[in-house]
Every structure is written in structure tokens, then in C-alpha cells.
């Protein structure tokens, strides 16, 4: 993932974590570990759909906080 996308993703995840009331330190840890894992999964891939990327990120977030993963996956459907 390019740096600009990672920066936007990190900011988006921080907003979701804050909305859920996840402590800042825990959120940072979840986000860091998720991004590392996603980058490892994507290593060597030249193209990936947004849907597949969302699925991978959601799967990783679910390891740390199920509600966080749900909100990330469905953020465009939640009012």
C-alpha cells in the first residue's frame, strides 16, 4: 500500500475507534498491527480490488475488536 493510502486508512480507523470509545492507546495498537498484517498479506500483489482490501482489513481488525471490524466494514451503511 502506498503511504498516502496508509495515512488515509489510519485516519479513518482512528475516527471509527474514537466513535466506539476505544482507548487511544489500544486503538493505535490495533491499527498498527492491522496495517502491518495487511501489508504483509499484500506483499507481491500488483493489483487488488477495494472490496478485497476491505475484506482483508476487516478480517485483521476482527482479531482485535469485533465491533471495530464491523463499523469499519459497514461505515458507509451506518447513519
Image (cartoon, rainbow, N blue to C red):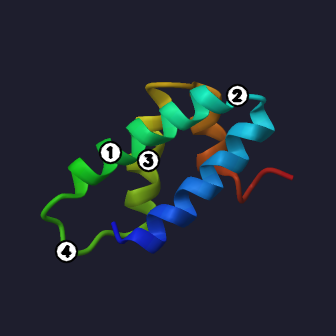
Single out the mark in the foreground, 2 or 3: 2
Within 10 Å of disc 1 (Cα), the crowding (few <14, some 14-19, many 20+) is few
Q: Secondary structure at mark 2?
A: loop
Identify the residue under disc 1: 36
Q: Earlier in the sequence, mark 1 or mark 3?
A: 1
Q: Is residue 21 visible?
A: yes
Q: Residue furthest front?
A: 25
Instruction: Compute the Cα span from label 3 to label 4.
Output: 17 Å
Q: Is residue 59 visible?
A: no
Residue 31 in the image: state x and y as whole percent. 50, 41
Q: Earlier in the sequence, mark 2 or mark 3?
A: 2
Identify the residue under disc 4: 46
28 versus 6 height, above or below = above
Single out the mark in the foreground, 1 or 3: 1
Quadrant of the rendered image containing residue 53: bottom left
Q: Secondary structure at mark 3?
A: helix
Q: Earlier in the sequence, mark 3 or mark 4?
A: 4
Identify the residue under disc 3: 57
Decide if residue 1 is on the left or right side of residue 25.
Answer: left
Quadrant of the rendered image containing residue 49: bottom left
Identify the residue under disc 2: 22
Amino acid at each position: 500500500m502506498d503511504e498516502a493510502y496508509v495515512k488515509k486508512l489510519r485516519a479513518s480507523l482512528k475516527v471509527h475507534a474514537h466513535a466506539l470509545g476505544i482507548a487511544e492507546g489500544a486503538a493505535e495498537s490495533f491499527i498498527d498491527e492491522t496495517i502491518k498484517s495487511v501489508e504483509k498479506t499484500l506483499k507481491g500483489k500488483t493489483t487488488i480490488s477495494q472490496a478485497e482490501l476491505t475484506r482483508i482489513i476487516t478480517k485483521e481488525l476482527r482479531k482485535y475488536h469485533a465491533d471495530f471490524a464491523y463499523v469499519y466494514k459497514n461505515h458507509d451503511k451506518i447513519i
